[in-house]
């Protein structure tokens, strides 16, 4: 096999507990005003104090989830509480919509222009309510979740830039995040709501956004699931497609749906074959389904989260199906990711590499990178490898 499963479980466990979490615990906490600093240089120095709602909620989620899944450490709960209290006080407008960004002290900077802030708020406060036992947090979680359901067909509302009626499209991001969010909210939802939303999101992702011929997950399609020949209509976001597939595997596993699990694994493998850079290694950030030049100038960058979500999907796919292709690809992505993104000198991972795999931005956190993808992937891979090693005993 080439890799020792127990050693891999230990690698992910130790990296999470002894490297990644201590970095955020040491450098990101704003005990003065509440919440977290996410704009951190390589060694952890704060270079900007604005607070981005996605990342604030994601960090609440991370530390709350670890309290719920591993152990209720007092410092983890205090870190989660520091963010939850700040967000509950400052994060929403008068109508309960979550802003995108705040100043350090909590004044609104950027309007609540789409529902992803609400998604991460629902995730965060659901886990925080479970970890803390504070009932008010359940209400915050449910209000945010209901906001997502209410706005999902028009996620940007009045902030939509597109002209109405000319070229209507829908985005993969909405059903994929709703699928994962709904699983996160399971303990707060009725079984009817849970099953209905999961069934609808899986159906939409695997029918409308999956191109059956190419085996690829498209980022945007027409409302009926057909393709539109334009930049957005041809866009493939490999990381999104792969992340969506492990969400689908997670749902299908609960339902013992081996057909959907295998279909999701097929898509992961297809995306990897399509998006892997044979010359320099690693996965491209954006691609055009038909091979035209992508409109995103950063299309050939290599991003931390794309590779982390691939590791999660591959080890999950391997554990659920035993397919050798998952294991072969896991080793390939593992070798690239651990040798290029991990920072043995200062801890945590770099986020952004150029196509050749050289560090592009000397940061550990910013406007889009916070305490989420890396700790989540470390935790999930640790758990998967632990399960695999006990199976093989």
Image: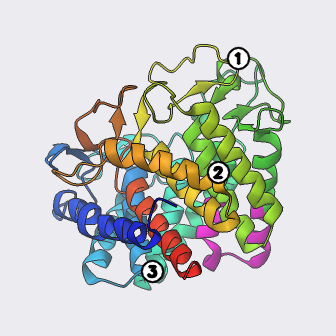
**Mark in front: 1 vs 2:** 2
**Mark in front: 3 vs 2:** 2
What SS does tag 2 mark?
A: helix
Residue 164 included in the magenta stretch of the image: no
- Residue 117 visible? The answer is no
Between discs 1 and 2, the one toward the N terminus: 1
Image coordinates for residue 69, horizontal then vertical, percent? 46, 79
Residue position for label 3: 68
What SS does tag 1 mark?
A: loop
Where, by quadrant of the figure, is residue 273 drawn? Answer: top right
Label 2 Cα crowd, 10 Å radius (few <14 / some 14-19 / many 20+): some
Q: From the viewer's perspective, is 154 left or right of 99?
A: right
Image coordinates for residue 96, horizontal then vertical, percent? 52, 57
Taking the spot 58% from the left edge, 55% from the top edge, the residue there is 327
- Region rendered in magenta: 179-198
Residue position for label 1: 230
Q: Kindly indicate whether the residue at mark 2 contacts the one at mark 1 (C-beta within 8 angstroms).
A: no
The foreground one among 190 and 76 is 76
Q: As displayed, is residue 110 above or below residue 294? A: below
Taking the spot 43% from the left edge, 73% from the top edge, the residue there is 6
Separation of residues labelled 1 and 2 (CA atoms)? 33 Å
Q: As displayed, is residue 366 above or below residue 279? A: below
Taking the spot 48% from the left edge, 54% from the top edge, the residue there is 94
Q: Kindly indicate whether the residue at mark 3 contacts the one at mark 1 (C-beta within 8 angstroms).
A: no
Image coordinates for residue 14, horizontal then vertical, percent? 30, 69
């Amino acid at each position: 096999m080439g890799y020792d499963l127990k050693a891999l479980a230990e690698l992910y466990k130790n990296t999470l507990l002894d490297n990644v979490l201590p970095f955020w615990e040491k450098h990101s906490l704003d005990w003065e005003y509440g919440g977290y600093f996410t704009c951190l240089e390589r060694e952890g120095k704060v270079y900007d104090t604005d607070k981005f709602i996605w990342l604030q909620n994601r960090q609440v989620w991370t530390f709350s989830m670890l309290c719920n899944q591993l152990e209720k450490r007092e410092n983890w709960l205090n870190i989660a509480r520091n963010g939850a209290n700040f967000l509950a006080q400052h994060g929403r407008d008068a109508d309960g919509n979550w802003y995108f960004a705040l100043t350090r002290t909590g004044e609104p900077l950027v309007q609540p222009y789409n529902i992803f802030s609400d998604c991460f708020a629902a995730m965060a406060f659901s886990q925080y309510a479970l970890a803390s036992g504070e009932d008010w947090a359940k209400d915050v979680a449910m209000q945010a979740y209901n906001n997502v359901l209410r706005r999902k067909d028009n996620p940007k509302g009045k902030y939509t830039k597109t002209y109405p009626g000319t070229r209507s499209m829908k985005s993969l991001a909405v059903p994929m995040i709703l699928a994962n969010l709904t699983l996160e909210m399971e303990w707060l939802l009725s079984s009817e709501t849970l099953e209905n939303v999961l069934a609808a999101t899986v159906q939409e992702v695997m029918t409308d956004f999956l191109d059956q011929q190419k085996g690829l997950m498209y980022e945007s399609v027409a409302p009926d699931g057909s393709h539109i020949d334009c930049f957005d209509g041809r866009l493939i976001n490999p990381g999104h497609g792969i992340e969506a597939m492990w969400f689908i595997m997670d749902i299908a596993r609960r339902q013992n749906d081996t057909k959907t699990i295998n279909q999701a694994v097929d898509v992961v493998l297809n995306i990897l074959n399509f998006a892997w850079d044979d010359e320099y290694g690693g996965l491209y950030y954006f691609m055009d389904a038909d091979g035209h030049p992508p409109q995103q100038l950063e299309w050939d960058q290599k991003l931390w989260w794309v590779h982390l979500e691939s590791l999660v999907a591959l080890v999950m796919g391997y554990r659920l199906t035993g397919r050798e292709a998952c294991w072969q690809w896991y080793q390939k992505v593992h070798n690239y990711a651990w040798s290029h993104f991990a920072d043995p000198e200062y801890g945590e991972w770099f986020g952004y590499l150029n196509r050749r795999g050289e560090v592009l931005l000397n940061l550990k956190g910013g406007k889009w990178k916070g305490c989420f993808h890396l700790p989540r992937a470390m935790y999930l891979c640790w758990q998967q490898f632990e399960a695999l090693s006990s199976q093989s005993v």
